[in-house]
């Protein structure tokens, strides 16, 4: 059965050592931007080639040119200033962006990278955006009067970027909203903002939300105005599937079948079982198979091994379905 | 003193923009084997001196050591108590920060002083009184995995005994104010409100024999739904977050006249600096509900969620507002 159980990825992939080195050298002013850019293109090319080779159905560019998923957009948008250091955990710190003026999109942000990746493969490359709710939640705001005002302003610029990706030919556009799960109280606001983004889109739209208080947010979560919701199911031990049996999951699902926080590589059997369990509650043409989340925290080899297992598991189930 | 200016607890560890981040560098060197724990201790001592001086200079009248020696409150106390281990990273309420989740694996008990030495160092290096914060028993239990007791109330009870021992020792060593941080009691966006009855059951045991001013400190959300019974608990003062918990303003209308209210009116989660005049009006409003002698002013939560510059500017704005309120600004 073709066209079912398509394999894909949540977005980020680990940066190879040569790129990590180049990023530090660039930060210290030791190499020019053009040299860094060339290595980002090389890493993107290698990741797209790898996905071609193992047969991923919906490809990503791997975000080799992005650092933090929010800071990347903040740096490209007007209205943001670079913030000071705040702690993430332990001895780790990051620069949290600050909204200091009206947010405007003055140029395309991801379209060129998307086009480069698409030029390297015949399979569709997914456009990858960070959602308005998450960009606001992970920034400071000194400009807007309320969280809602800032989120809705961001929704308009992310919508413009999504439309540009659609016009460039993207068949899949994902708008990541990992922050939604930390504050399910504001799910309505996230839904309202996402509706602004996806309203003009005719392509297949996806949102990814990380593990959180899904039980309380389900089935309201199904109001998220996208075609597919990608969920971190391995990390939540697939307990949501029982809820789907009670109240049908009416959208396509991005089924996370590999834990991105663990070094251990899942077995093909584990992936097969997870998919088969899901097929009892969601039909195969609405199931996309992928890792739980972006793989950027894993080593290059771990990420590749996990992706091979995901693809092989999906293939086995597909074969059984005939 | 009316409208005493204080803080909740944590303070940013990173330096001012362009400064050298010595503590981070020393911890990295420790990981590489190029520095010792003695070096780390020295870097922490330097930073404690710096953040205490900075708070005092901004006008804070009751400071903390900024908790700059801690990775996070949960880990600090889990490491200081017998019976605990730690596991994976967990998000700290609705912030974008993470902590290592404690695991109660065996009977929990205090094996020795936990933060007493830190307090003594801070006290010796502060021109103003130093408050010591302890994690509250309810919050530590709520954020931990329990593999031993199988009953949240039982874990809260043993934690209350251990934390009481620490608080008594702190008081004996001259600590005038001890705050028990209980954010898990509040209704924080994304989490259900805490179960007040579990803390109420151990509150006497927690504060018994502690010869210091004790404060039950909440932040990140509303405590209004616990009703006025919250303020009947045997603490000398209560800290509430009036930024993230707008319902708290309603709750303190019934604030008892014999307790201290620590009002968090400066937003510890956003860099926009408050206007001192607006803050002054807020203090005036609060003084209508609470005797100004028993009214303390603070940021809404620990300041480590902000960059260093913003933290310092916010404390200065708060102190400015308190001075205006007193009529000496």
Image: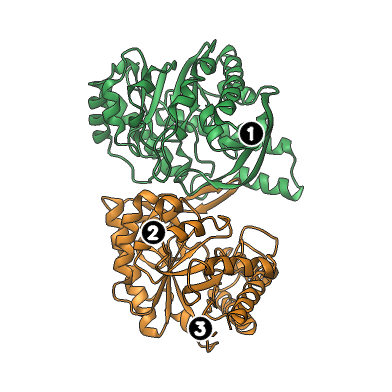
Chain colours: A orange, B green
Disc 2 secondary structure class: helix
Disc 1 secondary structure class: helix
In the rendering, at what x and y percent does residue B136 appear? 52, 27
Do tags 2 and 1 sit on the same chain? no
Marking on residue A122: none
Disc 3 secondary structure class: loop
Q: Residue at x 57, y 25 (%)?
A: B122
Label 1: chain letter: B
Disc 2 crowd, CA 10 A, few/some/many (<14, 14-19, 20+): some
Look at mark 3 in the image and give the residue it sits on.
A3
Disc 3 crowd, CA 10 A, few/some/many (<14, 14-19, 20+): few
Structural distance between the alpha carbons of marks 3 and 2: 26 Å
Q: Residue at x 37, y 18 (%)?
A: B260
In the rendering, at what x and y percent does residue A85 appear? 50, 50
Front residue of B263 and A266: A266
> In screen coordinates, is B137 left or right of A249?
right
In the rendering, at what x and y percent does residue B329 appear? 28, 26
- Which of discs 1 and 3 lies nearer the camera? The answer is 3
Structural distance between the alpha carbons of marks 2 and 1: 36 Å
Look at mark 1 in the image and give the residue it sits on.
B78
Q: Residue at x 35, y 16 (%)?
A: B1
Dot placed on the residue nearer the N-terminal end, 3 or 2: 3
In the rendering, at what x and y percent does residue A183 appear? 40, 49
Front residue of B223 and B238: B223
Front residue of A166 and A224: A224
Look at mark 2 in the image and give the residue it sits on.
A221
* Residue A12 visible from this viewpoint: yes
Disc 1 crowd, CA 10 A, few/some/many (<14, 14-19, 20+): many
The quadrant where residue A44 appears: bottom right
Label 2: chain letter: A
């Amino acid at each position: 059965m073709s066209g079912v159980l398509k394999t894909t990825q949540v977005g980020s992939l680990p940066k190879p050592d040569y790129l990590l080195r180049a990023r530090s050298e660039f930060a210290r002013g030791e190499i020019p931007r053009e040299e860094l850019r060339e290595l980002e293109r090389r890493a993107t090319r290698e990741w797209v080639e790898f996905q071609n080779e193992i047969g991923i159905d919906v490809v990503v560019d791997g975000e080799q040119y992005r650092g933090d998923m929010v800071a990347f957009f903040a740096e490209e948008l007007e209205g943001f200033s670079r913030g000071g250091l705040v702690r993430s955990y332990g001895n780790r710190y990051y620069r949290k962006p600050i909204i200091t003026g009206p947010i405007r999109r003055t140029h395309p942000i991801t379209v060129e990278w998307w086009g480069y990746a698409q030029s390297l493969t015949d399979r569709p490359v997914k456009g990858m955006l960070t959602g308005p709710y998450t960009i606001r939640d992970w920034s400071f705001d000194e400009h807007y009067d309320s969280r809602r005002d800032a989120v809705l302003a961001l929704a308009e610029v992310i919508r413009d970027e999504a439309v540009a990706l659609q016009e460039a030919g993207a068949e899949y556009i994902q708008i990541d909203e990992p922050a939604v799960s930390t504050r399910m109280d504001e799910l309505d606001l996230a839904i309202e903002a996402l509706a602004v983004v996806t309203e003009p889109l005719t392509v297949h739209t996806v949102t990814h939300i990380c593990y959180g208080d899904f039980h309380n947010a389900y089935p309201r979560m199904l109001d998220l105005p996208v075609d597919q919701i990608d969920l971190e199911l391995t990390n939540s031990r697939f307990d949501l599937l029982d809820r789907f049996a009670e109240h049908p999951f009416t959208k396509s699902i991005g089924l996370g079948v590999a834990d991105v926080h663990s070094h251990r590589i899942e077995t093909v059997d584990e992936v097969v079982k997870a998919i088969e369990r899901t097929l009892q509650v969601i039909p195969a043409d609405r199931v996309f198979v992928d890792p739980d989340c972006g793989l950027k925290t894993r080593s290059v080899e771990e990420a590749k091994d996990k992706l091979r297992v995901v693809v092989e598991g999906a293939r086995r189930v597909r074969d059984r379905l005939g | 003193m009316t409208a005493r200016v204080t803080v909740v607890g944590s303070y940013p560890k990173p330096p001012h923009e362009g400064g050298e981040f010595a503590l981070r560098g020393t911890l990295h060197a420790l990981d590489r084997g190029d520095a010792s724990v003695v070096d780390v201790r020295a870097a922490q001592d330097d930073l404690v001196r710096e953040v205490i001086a900075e708070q005092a200079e901004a006008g804070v009248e009751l400071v903390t050591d900024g908790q700059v020696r801690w990775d996070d409150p949960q880990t600090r106390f889990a490491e200081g108590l017998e019976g605990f281990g730690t596991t994976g990273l967990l998000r700290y309420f609705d912030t974008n920060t993470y902590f290592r989740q404690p695991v109660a694996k065996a009977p929990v008990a205090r094996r020795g002083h936990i933060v007493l030495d830190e307090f003594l160092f801070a006290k010796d290096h502060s021109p103003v009184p130093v408050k010591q914060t302890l994690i509250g028993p309810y919050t530590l239990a709520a954020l931990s995995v329990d593999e031993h007791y199988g009953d949240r109330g039982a874990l809260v009870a043993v934690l209350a005994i251990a934390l009481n021992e620490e608080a008594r020792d702190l008081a004996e060593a001259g600590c005038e104010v001890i705050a028990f941080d209980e954010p898990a009691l509040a209704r924080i966006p994304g989490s259900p409100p805490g179960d007040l009855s579990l803390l109420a059951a151990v509150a006497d045991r927690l504060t018994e024999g502690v010869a210091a001013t004790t404060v039950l400190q909440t932040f990140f959300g509303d405590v209004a739904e616990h009703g006025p019974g919250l303020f009947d608990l045997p603490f000398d003062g209560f800290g509430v977050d009036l930024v993230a918990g707008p319902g708290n303003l309603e709750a303190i209308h019934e604030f008892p006249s014999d307790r201290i209210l620590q009002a968090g009116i400066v937003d510890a989660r956003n860099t926009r600096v408050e206007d001192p005049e607006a803050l002054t009006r807020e203090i005036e409003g609060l003084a209508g509900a609470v005797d100004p002698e028993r009214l303390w002013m603070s940021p809404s939560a620990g300041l480590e969620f902000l960059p260093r510059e913003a933290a310092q500017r916010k404390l200065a704005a708060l102190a400015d507002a308190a001075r205006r309120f007193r009529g000496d600004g």
